[in-house]
């Protein structure tokens, strides 16, 4: 379907297997920027391996529907994650890494490969998410005004302020994805935002989740 379309050539940059970093409640989306503080030895090794290669790491959540999750082991993973490229790197004096991942495209997890290196590696396929590679794809269909109304209501309910000038100047794609990534919702909600079919569906999902939280009288002061 997309053969010969140069807009999708970046799909070839995604490997057929990818090192994955399982973190509950953490969301990466295409062109979003995710800061991470890496300190566990196996994930320090993972970052080293990524820096020696294509600088790619897959962010994925452990499954949240299987009871208690042992993050120190190898918990079962959600079926969809997002590949990110390391675009920022700093080593602290105590041996930690501070990195920034910039989202590239979502992927679906296949088989898990030999984990003798400590970190986890999975086969991935990204064909169904090829439209992730198109910047600003679907912006015109997004109910930006509805999203901003939901944001205003959330901030008011939690006695919070924000930089409205920056929000006004942000593209619709950046706004939807940034608000989704920094939202204070749980793993199930974050996964729903990740797996939303397109930008409009993601914005609609974020509005619906926010309205449900407000209806329940919920909220959190962690949204910034």
Image (cartoon, rainbow, N blue to C red):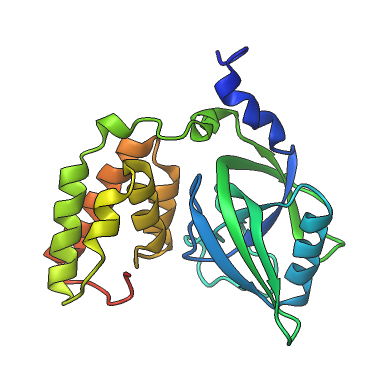
* Image point (68%, 65%), residue name: 89
Quarter of the picture holding the N terminus: top right
Q: Is residue 173 visible?
A: yes
Residue 123 placement, left or right of 166:
right
Q: Residue furthest right?
A: 116
Quarter of the picture holding the C terminus: bottom left
Q: Tell me residue 38's x, y (percent).
A: 67, 73
* Image point (34%, 68%), residue name: 184
Count of marks placed on residues: 0
* Image point (59%, 68%), residue name: 36
Q: Tell me residue 157's x, y (percent).
A: 13, 72
Q: Tell me residue 75's x, y (percent).
A: 64, 64
* Image point (44%, 48%), residue name: 194
Q: Is residue 79 visible?
A: no
Q: Is residue 22 above or below residue 126?
A: below
Residue 206 placement, left or right of 60:
left
The part of the image, by quadrant, that contains residue 139 is top left
Residue 136 placement, left or right of 84:
left
| Nearest the eye: 221 or 209 | 221
| Nearest the eye: 142 or 124 | 142
Q: Tell me residue 53's x, y (percent).
A: 82, 50
Q: Is residue 170 above or below residue 47?
A: above
């Amino acid at each position: 379907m997309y053969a010969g379309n140069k807009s999708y050539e970046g799909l070839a940059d995604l490997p057929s297997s990818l090192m994955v970093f399982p973190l509950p409640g953490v969301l990466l989306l295409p062109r979003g920027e995710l800061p991470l503080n890496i300190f566990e030895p196996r994930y320090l090794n993972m970052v080293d391996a990524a820096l020696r290669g294509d600088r790619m790491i897959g962010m994925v959540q452990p499954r949240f529907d299987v009871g208690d999750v042992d993050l120190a082991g190898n918990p079962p993973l959600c079926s969809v994650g997002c590949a990110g490229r390391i675009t920022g790197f700093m080593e602290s004096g105590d041996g930690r890494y501070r990195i920034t991942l910039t989202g590239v495209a979502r992927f679906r997890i296949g088989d898990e490969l030999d984990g003798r290196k400590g970190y986890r590696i999975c086969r991935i396929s990204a064909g169904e998410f090829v439209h992730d590679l198109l910047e600003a794809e679907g912006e015109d269909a997004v109910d930006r005004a509805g999203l901003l109304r939901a944001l205003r209501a959330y901030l008011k309910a939690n006695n919070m302020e924000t930089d409205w000038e920056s929000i006004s100047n942000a593209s619709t794609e950046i706004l939807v994805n940034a608000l989704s990534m920094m939202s204070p919702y749980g793993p199930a909600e974050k996964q729903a935002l990740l797996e939303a079919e397109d930008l409009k569906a993601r914005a609609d999902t974020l509005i619906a989740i926010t309205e449900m939280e407000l209806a329940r009288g919920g909220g959190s002061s962690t949204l910034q």
